[in-house]
Amino acid sequence: MKIAFLITHAYGMGGTIRTVTTLANQLCQRHDVEVISVNRTRERPFFRLDPRIRLRPLYDRVDGDGGGWLRGLLSSRRSLLMHRWDKAHSHYNLWGDLRALKVIRDLDADVLIGTRPALSLFAARWAPDRVVKVAQEHSYVFSHHRRVRDAMRRLYPRLDCVVSLTPASAEDMDAVLGHAGIRHPVIPNSIDTEGRPISTQQNKLVVAAGRLAPGKQHKHLVKAFARVARKHPDWKLRIYGAGACRDALRRQIFKRDLHNHVFLMGQCPNMEREFAKGSISVMCSRYEGLSMSILESMACGVPVVSYDCDHGPRSIITSGEDGLLVRNGDPRALADGIIELIEDESRRRAMAKTAIDTASAYDQRVIARRWEKLFEELLAAKRG
């Protein structure tokens, strides 16, 4: 089977990129896999891709992709073929449009997977009828602009399938699409659970990871940790990731005199090692699809204190058993949850063991088989 992923930026760091990489690495063991990246901004992908996978950038800012003066002109113009209200629209341009149009129209693949609305809408309009077209929804659907949701309602019925990460997010997608009659299974993200380092639960360390973006709300975590540090000054917090909010977070840390307690660690390609150094992990997003940081923390035997936001955390965490869900948007509740696990070590250790069991259900080998079964059924239906 020939399988192609269409992604905005396969070379970057982020949850969607990590999940696509994980799935592609597993599928390429039995299938011909290609990852089509709209952008390329660095020499190599941040996350390791199996060498059997073909990686094709459309707008290559490292080595160039031909085009001469026309490329220079069109790459400075905003995209006309990617939906203008998609949150990633600033990453697309007119040169990328033309390259994407040619690549997708001539695509030699059985299955094409769009990994965000702009790309899935593009596939719905331009991919050949002979190709099975799948939209993979990684975000909380109501976080998308109304006009994006309207476009999804109109164009997603042209797709063969829409895949959501959780039952709750599938219900939201059904509300957006109405009675479109499109196949709509739930398949969660996956992780590699074999050979992971496991936390000893001895280090007085809290770990968080994710893009330093407004929606991730790390400012809530810094505020919460000010309260934690007053009660337990021997505990530290490490925040991994990069993004637009880094400077604001640094100022907040110094303003609250937390420079000896809270550390911005930057990007890390091997987060499993860093999670395993911690004893508690935290997730404080405004909304979350199916958090890779939660799954990876739990696989390393680190219980997670998370906001009970829509929808991902509550689909993974059973509060009180393998982690804690606290009131969404409330830094004080976040601090109380962290303090609760700091002060009750035996409970924290019990949660850590259960967290490993919870994570095992998301093993990449199990989830890849579900994708393969879906692709086989969709191909059989298309071929009659």
Image: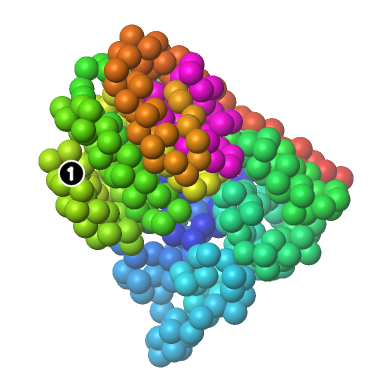
Q: Is residue 89 above or below residue 265?
A: below
Q: Nearer the viewer, residue 105 or 206?
A: 206
Q: Quadrant of the N terminus?
A: top right
Q: Is residue 180 above or below residue 360?
A: below
Q: Position of residue 130 (x, y in %)?
A: 75, 57
Q: Magenta stretch: residue 354 in it?
A: no
Which residue is rendered at x = 33% and y = 9% of the image? Answer: 346
Query: Can you see residue 141?
Result: yes
Q: Magenta stretch: residue 310 in it?
A: yes
Query: Can you see residue 52?
Result: no
Is residue 125 rendered to the left or right of residue 113?
A: right
Q: Position of residue 203 (x, y in %)?
A: 20, 22
Q: Secondary structure at mark 1?
A: loop
Question: Magenta span covers which residues?
Answer: 295-322
What residue type is disc 1 on?
Leu
Which residue is rendered at x = 57% and y = 53% of the image? Answer: 115
**To which residue does mark 1 refer?**
258
Q: Position of residue 265 (x, y in %)?
A: 22, 45
Q: Nearer the viewer, residue 38 or 90?
A: 90
Q: Position of residue 301 (x, y in %)?
A: 36, 20
Q: Is residue 217 above or below residue 107?
A: above
Count of marks, rendered view: 1
